[in-house]
Image (cartoon, coloured by chain):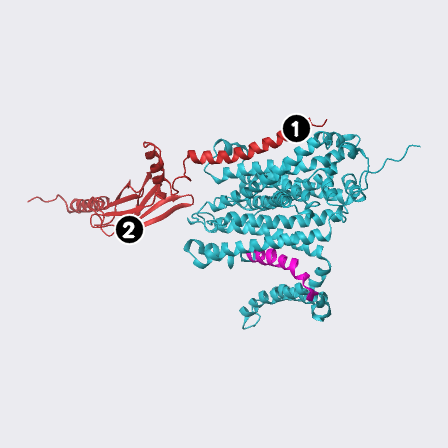
């Protein structure tokens, strides 16, 4: 049987092994089971224009974390505005349906002591509309105001505004012409 | 000996023309004061240009404040000139003749000042061109620019055209100098020939008809800047007529003040009589009642429902931070002026003089004493005054003040009955102060109650506090308005000479220079 040459060396080695084990334990300590460690944020635009945001929360081992509170936020002029607070299901998924106003910077947060956050940029729907032929149906879908009053130029609107302005200004022109006649008729 | 040339003007016309060339020390003091205020306003504006809008109370959520209040106020006051003049011309109201030019000049001066205000509010004048280069036709802001430009042009024409015969008179009166040159150019060679009279008649007919929808559209479009949004307090379907009625109300009241000022300063008692104030008073009463009706409809509907989005705004206006201002507009700017214009005419008011308690002296003394007690006593007494019902004591003054106010008003009614012009002027001033404050109360409380919460902003940003820069520029704008108006009255007669001749008071028949070329006084009124 192997024996250490000296008790001093033996004790030294034991202490070193213990310290090494402690350091390894500290450095490689796995997250507590169920503690959110990663958050994957996804978003897609639904047909009705709303945005469906999905956050998947996993722990250090990649296992889904259930019952974690996820807060969805959008960036506004005055900072981050909380738009939804959802708890994850057993697959670690938390879903929220957001209005089109959420277009822009979307963020999801979870975790009590250590906050895990993911942020993504949601493009405005306007870029998608460019692929379509403009028309009343398209405008109806894009604008909260149907038809005539639209975020896009409508020929009828231009025609009406133009007609009113042209009518008034041509009358002014006629008045100026009459003033010119007064000047001419001074005898 | 050469016979003396007969004076082609009646004595009252001579008095009117004298106001063009003769100015007392009061005039120069007034002009000096106005120029000083304008100069101070320019310094304030340069400060704003140099350091940005941060020197004002405007912030991200308060993009409109005092400047846009001024804008809406001036555009509103501008309404009355063109509209009142056009409607009275079309309906053939003869009493209008001495006052229409005053009203039309108000339109011109206030439009100039009003149109300036949005550019001051923008902060960056170098970006003004962007309004036109990148303006969106769908935006009420662009509609507003078009409407104001159209109205300014139309009202300038509407002011200028009826002045042509008078300018011809002045051209013939002044033999030389800058006045002669100016009047020669602006009179367009007017000789009063039948052809010229025919053209003038046609122009005035056209302008009187077209200026009415243009004027109505301007303030309607101004209201749409607010009404086309979903913001609490602005999301209203009746904002258009509400703004138009309020504009006419304040504008007519401004004309009363102008009438009184010119009557006194230029001694126009023969032109502007008590009857004119009475008739203008009727107009103000009618417009005030219409405005009161729209106000009731505008506030009662959302207040009855108290929807979540409106609640904060309505609470702030009715009983919160803006309540003193709002209730002043309703009582001081609407109710009291209407009472001032109506109650003194009731015969029973004359008997108030015989009631000891309804004499001005005891009422004034009581009000003054009460004011001293209620204003100074809380400051003098220690906070814990040992009054168990301190809250009750604190609430009493509002009701006492109301009672004292009613008492004071009743006591002064006989005074106003004897001096109806003073009553009309006090009413006019109150209406205009109330009108300005009302525009402030329309704009600011809504901005203070946004749909999205004001987050991560300094605490001071939650409340709008105008700074000295804004007040200085506002004072300069008001001074600019008065100065333009004043100078106008020094260059052109503030009362139409040829139109008032047709009113029935003709001067003695003469063969003066004016009569020699067709008789200016014979121009028919459409």
Q: Secondary structure at mark 1?
A: helix
In 3D space, how far apart are the residues under numbered discs 1 and 2 (Cα atoms)? Answer: 77 Å
> Hey, which quadrant is residue B344 in on the image?
bottom right
Q: Is residue A9 magenta?
A: no
Q: Quadrant of the N terminus of chain B?
A: top right
User: At which x and y percent is residue A99?
Assistant: 34, 45
Write the start and end of the magenta stretch as one range. B325-349
> Hey, which quadrant is residue B31 in on the image?
top right
Q: Chain of mark 1?
A: A
The picture's colour for chain A is red
User: At which x and y percent is residue B78?
Assistant: 61, 43
Residue for point 52% across, 42% down: B221
Q: Is residue B198 above or below residue B361?
A: above
Residue for point 46% across, 58% down: B303
Per the rendering, the mark at residue B512 is none
Q: Is residue B284 above or below residue B224?
A: below
Report the chain shown in cyan. Answer: B
Query: CB under 8 Å between callouts 1 and 2?
Result: no
Circle 1 residue = A181
User: At which x and y percent is residue B47?
Assistant: 59, 39
Q: Chain of mark 2?
A: A
Mark 2, Cα crowd under 10 Å, few <14 / some 14-19 / many 20+, is some
Per the rendering, the mark at residue A86 is 2
């Amino acid at each position: 049987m192997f024996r250490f040459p000296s008790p001093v060396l033996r004790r030294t080695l034991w202490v070193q092994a213990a310290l090494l084990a402690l350091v390894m334990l500290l450095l490689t300590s796995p997250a507590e089971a169920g503690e959110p460690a990663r958050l994957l944020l996804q978003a897609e635009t639904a047909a009705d224009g709303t945005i469906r945001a999905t956050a998947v929360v996993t722990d250090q081992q990649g296992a889904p974390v259930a019952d974690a509170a996820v807060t969805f936020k959008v960036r506004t002029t005055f900072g981050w505005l909380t738009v939804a607070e959802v708890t994850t299901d057993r697959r670690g998924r938390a879903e929220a349906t957001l209005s089109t106003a959420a277009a822009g910077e979307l963020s999801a947060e979870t975790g009590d002591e250590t906050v895990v956050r993911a942020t993504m940029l949601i493009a405005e729907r306007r870029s998608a509309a460019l692929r379509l032929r403009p028309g009343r149906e398209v405008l109806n879908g894009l604008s909260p105001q149907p038809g005539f009053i639209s975020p896009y130029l409508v020929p009828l609107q231009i025609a009406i505004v133009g007609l009113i302005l042209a009518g008034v200004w041509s009358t002014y022109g006629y008045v100026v012409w009459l003033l010119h006649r007064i000047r001419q008729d001074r005898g | 000996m050469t016979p003396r040339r007969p004076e082609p003007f009646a004595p009252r016309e001579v008095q009117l023309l004298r106001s063009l060339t003769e100015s007392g020390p009061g005039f120069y003091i007034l002009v000096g004061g106005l120029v000083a205020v304008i100069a101070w306003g320019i310094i304030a504006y340069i400060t704003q240009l140099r350091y940005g809008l941060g020197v004002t109370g405007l912030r991200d959520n308060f993009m409109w404040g005092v400047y846009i209040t001024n804008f809406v106020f001036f555009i509103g006051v501008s309404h009355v000139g063109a509209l009142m003049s056009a409607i009275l011309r079309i309906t053939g109201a003869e009493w209008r003749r001495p006052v229409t030019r005053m009203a039309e000049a108000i339109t011109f001066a206030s439009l100039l000042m009003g149109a300036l205000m949005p550019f001051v509010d923008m902060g960056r004048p170098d970006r003004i061109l962007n309004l036109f280069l990148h303006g969106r036709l769908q935006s009420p802001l662009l509609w507003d620019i078009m409407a104001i430009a159209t109205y300014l042009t139309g009202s300038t024409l509407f002011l200028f055209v009826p002045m042509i015969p008078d300018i011809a008179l002045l051209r013939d009166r002044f033999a030389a100098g800058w006045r002669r040159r100016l009047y020669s150019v602006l009179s367009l060679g007017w000789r009063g020939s039948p052809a010229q009279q025919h053209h003038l008649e046609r122009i005035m007919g056209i302008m009187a008809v077209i200026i009415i929808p243009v004027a109505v559209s301007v303030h309607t479009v101004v209201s749409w800047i607010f009404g086309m949004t979903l913001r609490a307090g602005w999301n209203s379907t009746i904002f258009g007529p509400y703004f138009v009625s309020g504009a006419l109300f304040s504008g007519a009241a401004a004309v009363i003040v102008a009438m009184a000022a010119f009557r006194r300063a230029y001694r126009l008692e023969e032109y502007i009589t008590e009857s004119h104030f009475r008739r203008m008073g009727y107009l103000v009463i009618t417009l005030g009642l219409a405005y009161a009706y729209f106000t009731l409809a505008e506030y009662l509907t959302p207040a009855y429902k108290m929807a979540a989005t409106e609640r904060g705004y309505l609470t702030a206006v009715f009983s919160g931070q803006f309540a003193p201002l709002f209730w002043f507009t309703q009582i001081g700017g609407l109710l009291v002026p209407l009472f001032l214009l109506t109650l003194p005419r009731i015969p029973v008011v004359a008997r108030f003089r015989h009631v000891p308690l309804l004499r001005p002296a005891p009422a004034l003394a009581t009000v003054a004493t009460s004011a001293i007690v209620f204003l100074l006593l809380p400051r003098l007494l220690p906070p814990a005054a040992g009054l168990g019902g301190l809250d009750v004591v604190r609430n009493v003054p509002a009701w006492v003040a109301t009672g004292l106010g009613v008492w004071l008003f009743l006591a002064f009614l006989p005074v106003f009955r004897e001096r109806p012009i003073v009553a009309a002027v006090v009413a006019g001033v109150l209406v205009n102060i109330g009108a300005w404050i009302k525009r402030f109360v329309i704009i600011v409380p809504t901005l203070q109650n946004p749909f999205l919460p004001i987050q991560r902003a300094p605490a001071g940003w939650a409340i709008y506090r105008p700074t000295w820069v804004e007040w200085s520029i506002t004072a300069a704008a008001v001074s600019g308005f008065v100065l333009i108006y004043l100078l106008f009255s020094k260059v052109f007669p503030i009362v139409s000479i040829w139109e008032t001749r047709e009113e029935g008071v003709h001067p003695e028949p003469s063969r003066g220079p004016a009569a020699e070329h067709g008789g200016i006084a014979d121009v028919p009124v459409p």
